[in-house]
Amino acid sequence: MKTFCIIRRAAQAVAPAAALFMFAACSKTDVPVATPAVDQGRIKVYHEAASANVGLKFLFDDAEKANIMYGQVSDYQSLNTGSRTIKVNVATSNATVATQMASVEKDKNYSFFAYSTSASQLAGLLVPDDLTAPSSGKAKIRFVNLGQGAATPLKLSTTAASSVDIPGTETQFATVSSFVEVLPGQYNVAVTSGAASTLVYNVGEGNGTSTAATGTAANKTYEAGKIYTVVFRGITGATVDAALLPKAVIVQNN
């Protein structure tokens, strides 16, 4: 009888410890390990290099983000923060034609433009995109001057009755103005030069079909709350292919 009591007490002492061990073992497998989120920014890429009238691939740390033809623009792509290497490769041969370093910050937006510097060379232009909403009842616009061989500096003007410059849009070749606020409405914007705001190219509807020769263009409706980028691209020259001559196009950023 005494032996039985000793055995029973020993079993009673071991049981709680065993239950605790089983609970601990279950806890280790039942609780998932959280994976920390990776900080990211976003980037939009533009193929504006008329001297490379072929498909281009845009790689960030060797990860392809876009494969586009001349005149095309990608959507915004996510990109990890930190120092990133941008490569522009010819799509067919994968030969690298431009390389650039970029510092990407958390929750920031960027645009990367591939553009022509000569008949056989191209370069990259990386700029931040401030997509802060415009003031109530306003739109925002900026100007990107990538017209090879065109007069410089250039600016944007409205042409409702006479040319009226849009303040803050004058830029040298291969530079970008800040976004500036404009009134919404239906009107034509033109690329102009000099104190007299000489017409260089009508932006019109922003699809690249307007011309400077006519002096007139279809109006575009600029909407309140929207953000626009006007890109002037192409090569000036008498023997240049018509598809590569200077054009002005509009890209909506939001």
Image: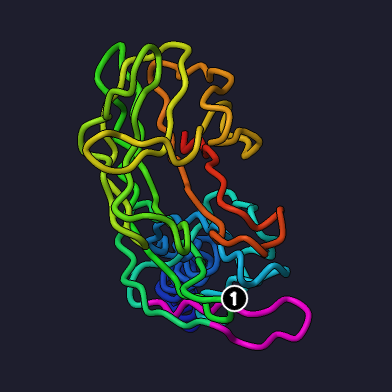
Q: Which residue is outermost to the front?
A: 238
> Relative to residue 92, is residue 192 depicted above or below?
above
The picture places residue 156, in percent across and down from the top left corner, at 34, 35
Who's the residue at 51% across and 66% down the image? Answer: 114
Identity of the amino acid at label 1?
Answer: Ala
- Location of residue 164 by image quarter: top left
Question: Measured from the top left, where is residue 250 in percent x and y?
Answer: 52, 37
Name the residue carrying label 1.
Answer: 63
Secondary structure, mark 1, is strand
Judging depth in this view, the residue of 199 and 97 nearest the camera is: 199
Give the side of residue 161 with respect to residue 196, left or right.
right
Magenta residues (range): 84-97
Give the camera-side residue of 8 and 14.
14
Residue placed most toward the observer, 171 or 91: 171
In the displayed structure, 101 sits above or below 141; it is below
Residue 4 at least partly seen: no
Query: Magenta span has 94?
Result: yes
Q: Residue furthest right?
A: 92
Q: Give me the residue at 39% from left, 57% from top.
A: 41
Inspect the magenta stretch and tell me whether residue 95 lies in it: yes
Please report the residue visible at 51 percent of the width from the left and 74 percent of the height from the top: 60
